[in-house]
Amino acid sequence: MDEQFWDRMYSDREQLWSGRPNGALVTEAAGLEPGHALDVGCGEGGDAHWLAEHGWTVTGVDLSRVALERAREVCRGRSVELRRQDLAQEPPEPAFYDLVSLHYFPLLREKDHTALLGLVEAVAPGGTLLVVGHDMSDLQGHEGGDHDPADYYQPSEFAGFLGEGWTIEADEVRPRVDAAPEGTGHVNDVVLRARRAA
């Protein structure tokens, strides 16, 4: 799932995603004090736009230039900076973001966990890490394509990398807020929300 893969995915359709913010983001972030947010795998900008509308200053990162161009149109005039960034090669600024948000982002496993640790370290004191993924049990009996889900970190695994000074506020499977995308078996979300000590 490299830059070329995602550029092809976006180029094949006029709009790949719904344009609405992810339901879990709205549920989990609605009560947070706005600050600086990192939207990982920002895609066409639905989450970044919602965060900016609710007072956040947003940095959105993605591998796909096609997606980022669409996100620029969606987020025009908002407090959103969008950039192409490979998190395995260029980690985000440490201890800077009041919210680090990953929704359905395929973060590839690495022996040294560079990208994952960089995201954890990017959370500022008092900030929140929010990781949302598909419940893998929903995929039983569905064609997985060329990608093995076991090659990617699942939300609950982030908890094992948090260390001292973190409070896990949610680590659970729950029904999706929004209906599953057509043709998929994604009925439930896995949600990890953790707060770093101030």
Image (cartoon, rainbow, N blue to C red):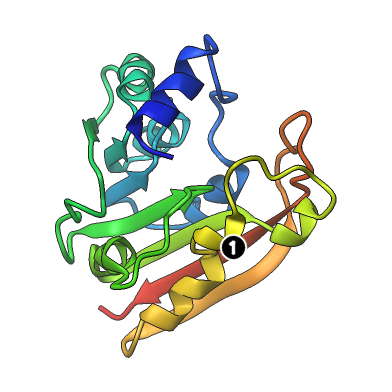
Q: Is residue 81 left or right of residue 129?
A: left
Q: Residue at x 24, y 57 (%)?
A: 97
Q: Residue at x 25, y 78 (%)?
A: 198
Vertically, is 62 above or below 127? above
Residue nearest the viewer, comparing 117 with 128: 117
Residue 49, image x and y in percent?
A: 40, 30
Outermost residue toward the top in this view: 14
For label 1, the crowd category at 10 Å Cα-Cα, with few meaning under 14, some 14 to 19 and many 20 or more, is: many
Outermost residue toward the bottom in this view: 164
Q: Residue at x 50, y 59 (%)?
A: 152
Q: Residue at x 44, y 34 (%)?
A: 50
Tag 1, which secondary structure? strand
Vertically, is 14 above or below 125? above
Vertically, is 192 above or below 187? below
Q: Quadrant of residue 69?
A: top left
Q: Quadrant of residue 173?
A: bottom right
Residue under label 1: 191
Residue nearest the viewer, comparing 62 with 88: 88
Q: Amino acid at mark 1?
A: Val
Outermost residue toward the right in this view: 141
Residue 131, image x and y in percent?
A: 49, 59
Q: Is residue 173 left or right of residue 4?
A: right
Q: Is residue 91 left or right of residue 50?
A: left
- Quadrant where the N terminus is found in the figure: top left
Residue 100, image x and y in percent?
A: 35, 56
Residue 88, image x and y in percent?
A: 25, 54
